[in-house]
């Protein structure tokens, strides 16, 4: 699937935005990162008065073949489906933070290993009942991977058509920190052992076991020829987020990036379309050890660092009010001229 992502680097509106930011009633640069965010969103929307419309978080869920064995994940695979019901009932962390900040939340079955009845609030985009175990074979076929990318793009296009122009992504999938670590190693070139962390809470011994298992997987992957990396490591939720991110950039939406797993989907998106980064705001630094290194790879500094390591899009939901502040100062603050405040320094 092809995407048409425009670089924002030559947008003329940036000069107007810079002037507007600089003439607000504050010392030059005094709103720090908020000024950068205001500039970025103004450039994305090609507007000196950008608006945030229908903020939405899409949570994609999928299961992972490897997770059935429990060698790399402390929680059992069933938790993925159980958490879907929790999302639908409004009881998960992401529900609480979205409700608090008036963010619309949608949950998508990208490939959970459970048969759901038609449930209001759950979008059925199931590719399969979980991926295959990449210890034995690629997690998915190239066709399944393409289908997932398409689906992610399609769901974002629908969200856009419903009036949304700022979007974040979350995920749920027991075992998906392992896929994210493998993708990270491939796209950043960092040794696989350095990309592996505690996930949902492995102790140091169990982390060593996870490193050993994933090092073997990575070796096998390296010896295979002409493989589709995203298809090889999975999962369905990650591939869907990759398509979702690319479509959002194509539609000139502001994209808020969550933690370790969503950033691994961005790594895959970025490899083919580096301009995608211009549309991304990084919400937070996850406590998952590899995340900081992913962010360093992109040379990006997120908005907050609260030691959160949950996923679901919770970093996005918690950081969102900061983005609202950035747009509000740009639109609502007085200028030196309008307020009659002197802008001369001695
Ligand atoms: C109750 C519960 C809720 C979660 N919400 C997100 N995750 C997070 O943990 C999982 C990845 O970690 P690992 O690779 O170690 O399995 C993903 O589902 C992720 O979204 C959760 C995990 C659990 C147990
Ligand atoms: O940073 C994340 O997204 C994350 C970290 C650990 C477990 N689940 C998600």
Image (spheres, rainbow, N blue to C red):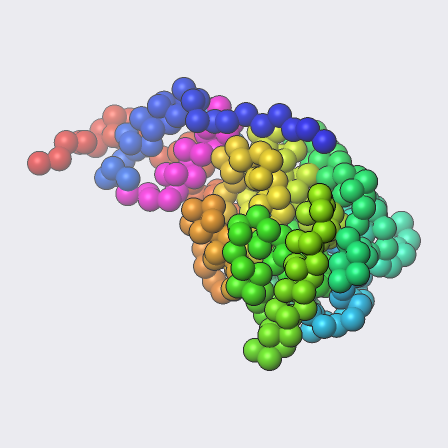
The residue drawn where x is 54% and y is 59% is: 191
Judging depth in this view, the residue of 334 and 134 nearest the camera is: 134
The extreme left residue here reads 346
Position of the N terminus, as image quadrant, is top right
The residue drawn where x is 80% and y is 68% is: 68
The residues colored magenta run: 30-46
In this image, 92 relative to 88: left or right? left
Does residue 270 belong to the magenta stretch? no
Position of the C terminus, as image quadrant, is top left
Judging depth in this view, the residue of 323 and 69 nearest the camera is: 69
Among the 4 quarters of the image, the one containing residue 48:
top left
Q: Is residue 308 above or below residue 3?
A: below
Judging depth in this view, the residue of 319 and 339 nearest the camera is: 319
Residue 215 visible in image: yes
Does residue 42 belong to the magenta stretch? yes
Judging depth in this view, the residue of 195 and 19 nearest the camera is: 195
The extreme top residue here reads 12
Assign ligand 2 to one image quadrant: bottom right
């Amino acid at each position: 699937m092809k995407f048409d992502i425009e670089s924002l680097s030559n947008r003329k509106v940036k000069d107007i935005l810079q002037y507007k930011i600089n003439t607000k009633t504050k010392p030059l640069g005094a709103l720090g990162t908020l000024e950068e965010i205001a500039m970025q969103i103004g450039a994305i929307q090609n507007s000196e008065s950008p608006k945030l419309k229908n903020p939405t978080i899409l949570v994609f869920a999928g299961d992972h073949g490897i997770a059935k064995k429990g060698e790399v994940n402390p929680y059992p695979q069933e938790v993925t489906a159980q958490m879907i019901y929790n999302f639908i009932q409004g009881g998960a962390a992401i529900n609480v933070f979205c409700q608090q900040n008036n963010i619309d939340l949608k949950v998508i079955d990208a490939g959970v290993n459970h048969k759901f009845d038609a449930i209001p609030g759950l979008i059925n985009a199931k590719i399969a009942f979980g991926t295959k175990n990449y210890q034995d074979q690629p997690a998915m076929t190239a066709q399944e991977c393409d289908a997932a990318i398409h689906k992610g793009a399609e769901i974002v296009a629908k969200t856009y058509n419903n009036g949304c122009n700022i979007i974040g992504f979350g995920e749920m999938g027991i075992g998906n920190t392992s896929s994210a670590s493998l993708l990270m190693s491939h796209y950043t070139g960092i040794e696989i052992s350095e990309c592996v962390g505690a996930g949902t809470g492995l102790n140091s011994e169990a982390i060593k076991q996870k490193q050993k298992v994933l090092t073997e997987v990575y070796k096998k992957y390296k010896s295979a020829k002409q493989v589709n990396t995203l298809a090889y490591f999975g999962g369905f939720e990650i591939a869907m987020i990759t398509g979702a991110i690319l479509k959002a950039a194509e539609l000139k939406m502001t994209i808020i990036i969550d933690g370790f797993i969503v950033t691994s989907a961005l790594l895959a998106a970025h490899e083919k379309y580096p301009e995608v980064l211009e549309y991304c705001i990084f919400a937070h630094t996850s406590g998952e050890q590899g995340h900081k290194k992913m962010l360093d790879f992109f040379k990006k500094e997120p908005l907050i660092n609260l030691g959160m390591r949950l996923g679901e899009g919770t970093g996005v939901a918690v950081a969102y009010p900061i983005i609202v502040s950035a747009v509000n100062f740009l639109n609502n603050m007085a200028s030196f001229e309008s307020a009659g405040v002197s802008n001369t320094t001695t």
